[in-house]
Amino acid sequence: MSKNISSPAELLQLRKLSARIGSDLQFTQASSGNSSIKLDDTLWIKASGRWMADALNENVLIPLNMAEVQNCVKRNIDPAARFAGASIETSMHAVLPHRVVLHLHSVNTIAWAVRKDAPLRLEDKLAGLRWNWIPHVPSGLPLAQEIENILSALANTNVFILGNHGLVIGGYDCGEVEDLLSQVEQRLAIRPRVPERADYSALVKIASGSSWDLPDDDEVHALGTDALAQEVLSGGFLYPAQSVFLDSCTPELFLPISFPDSEDEFESRYSSRPFLIIKGRGVVVKRAMTRAQHAMMSGLTRVIQRISSHAPIRYLTGEEVANSSGANPH
């Protein structure tokens, strides 16, 4: 593993870009997404489970020898299993020819990418850009191999829309990548629905003297007050990041429940759940809910508020959900 840095300034620029992007819920939630730069023989990439938002305060980037990573991919070995701390998306970053790569869970992109008609609708939205669509495949080697297939035919592709997943952008330097991201976001921007106001008095009544609390992000209450949001959630899982909640809960977690006759009913029936979507009222969360779960919930809300009532949604299959729940964090 090489630790040679050909340009400390370029590495600093990636850290600054990662921190900006990672601090914006529109692009990144918790440890999702990653960034990388290729300097000489080294691939500097955000480590698994680290947050891009922390890029200026912590060593979130790790150096990997490019030749060794690429050799793993050629031998059909996932680099994430070979190198300690490597992101599950390391192989994807390695096969891309661009010096700088961003992989993001942009809420605007995902709101399009969960649609069955996304490839057709995006043709107009992204006309003139060097982009391509990739139907949903598992992260890691399968995704890297799909990208290689596209590049073998269209080598100049620098924007990839990942079905039921997110966005990948590549460029020569951080400035070029950030400019391209801005173009894509402007084209894919969707105005979110404005939901009914949460019933804060009811939610406070539930939380008082219990293990429940109100979420810090008020937008999350839309999951309980927006009927369309509940309809979308009832259909299944939209993208892999939702599986962050599956360790202790079932998909029923995302279904709304009725306001109870007594507060004790919440503690007795739903004690294992990290949050509750209460129909027509809003959301309450367990005080023990993790920082990552809070961020993922905020991102999910923003995605759903951008899905229209007539959108033909393509949900993840049971096998895809199972594969995503076993994957290590980006």
Image (tube, rainbow, N blue to C red):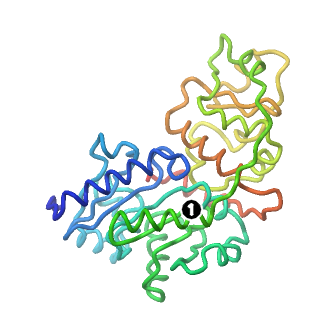
Residue 46, image x, y percentages:
34, 54
Which image quarter is the N terminus in? Answer: bottom left
In the image shown, does 209 or 78 lie closer to the viewer? 209
Q: Which type of secondary structure does the marked residue at label 1 adopt? A: helix
Residue located 65% across and 47% down the image: 302
Q: Which amino acid does label 1 sit on?
A: Glu
In the image, residue 191 above or below residue 312: above
* Image location of residue 126, percent across then percent down: 60, 74
Q: In which quarter of the image is residue 144?
A: bottom left
Res. 279 image quadrant? top right
What residue sits 22% from the left and 67% below the top?
39
Q: Residue at x 57, y 23 (%)?
A: 287
Question: Is 114 placed left or right of 10 in the picture?
Answer: right
The local crowd at label 1, few if under 14, some if 14 to 19, many if 20 or more residues have their Cα within 10 Å, is: some
Compared to residue 174, the image places residue 151 above or below, namely below
Q: Which residue is label 1 attached to?
A: 185
237 in relation to 125, above or below:
above
Q: Find residue 299 and report its horizontal and vertical position in percent.
A: 59, 46
* Residue 87, percent from left and from top: 38, 56
Q: Which residue lies furthest to the top in this view?
A: 209
Looking at the image, which is closer to me, 179 or 2? 179
Please state if 285 lies on the left or on the right of 269 as rendered.
left
